[in-house]
Amino acid sequence: MLKIAVCDDNENFLEVLKRITLENALHYFKKVSVQDFTDGQSLLNHHKQTHFDIIFLDIDMPEFTGFDVAQALRKQRKDCYIIFVTNHNEFVYGSMEFQPFYFICKSNILSLKTDISNVLNKLSIHFRQHKKLIISDEEHGRICVQYRDILYIESDNHHVKYCVIDEHEISTFVKVRAVIGELEKELSDFNFSRVHKKYLVNLSHIFNLDMKKDEVIFKQGFRLPMSRKYKHMVDDDFSKYLRETI
């Protein structure tokens, strides 16, 4: 169950915010609950008992501002995603110390719907990349990784090799018995794209596509071949990924 909180001292706007958030969240997540609060202290008290995954937070509230709430949230737990909602664009820079995931202007209801849909889509992608899986081979035993840790997967006869990167940018290859074609279907929802009969790449690690040399350029500086059979599909996948994450 994904738990979302919305907080705004304007009760009319809060009702609209809650409705739009719930309607859009159900497009991207299977099970969702949305709870509303008219003041920051009530939100914080509830957050201590029931941890919220996502919090839409008004900045300009009396007595206990959105920044005060965000500061307290970061002291309680750092693994919640804060989206500031306000009419005051000048607050954007001041909000950065609280590490917000996004910043939404609430002056226009039509754009509010689009902005909330966009941010929830970005969060769904973010959550998928942080999901964990366990892979193992004889050399390394069982290791737990997140999808974001996988740079690419290489086909090797009846096996595949996962190229996994750690926090020090050091790559490890884990060889498991699998078919790359089956993994292509399984991992399509996790932003992996088939670039070659031998390679399946994580689009979050791609810097660019070299369409002249038929190569995929990774942010880490190396390249992999991209076959003509897949290049246009990869280009479409990468363009879609950039639109949804930028």
Image: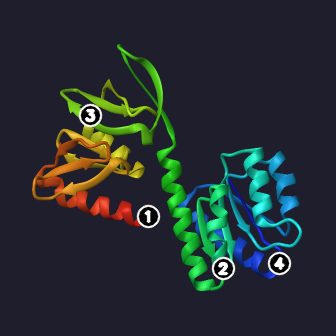
Mark 4 and mark 2: span between their CA atoms?
Answer: 14 Å
Mark 1 and mark 2: span between their CA atoms?
Answer: 20 Å
Instruction: Name the amino acid type tagged 4.
Output: Glu
Q: Relative to residue 151, is residue 242 depicted above or below?
A: below
> On residue 106, which mark appears?
2
The residue identified by callout 4 is: 11
Crowding near the residue tagged with mark 2, few <14, some 14–19, many ≥20 C-alpha atoms within 10 Å: many
Q: Secondary structure at mark 1?
A: loop
Q: Nearer the viewer, residue 37 or 32?
A: 37
The residue identified by callout 1 is: 246
Which badge, 1 or 2, comes first in the chain's sequence? Answer: 2
Q: Nearer the viewer, residue 133 or 31?
A: 133
Q: Secondary structure at mark 4?
A: helix
Identify the residue shown where x is 59% and y is 69%.
Answer: 24
The residue identified by callout 3 is: 179
Instruction: Name the amino acid type tagged 1.
Output: Ile
Asked if the residues shown at circle 3 and circle 2 are in contact, with their CB atoms under 8 angstroms apart, the answer is no
Identify the residue shown where x is 87% and y is 73%.
Answer: 62
Crowding near the residue tagged with mark 3, few <14, some 14–19, many ≥20 C-alpha atoms within 10 Å: some
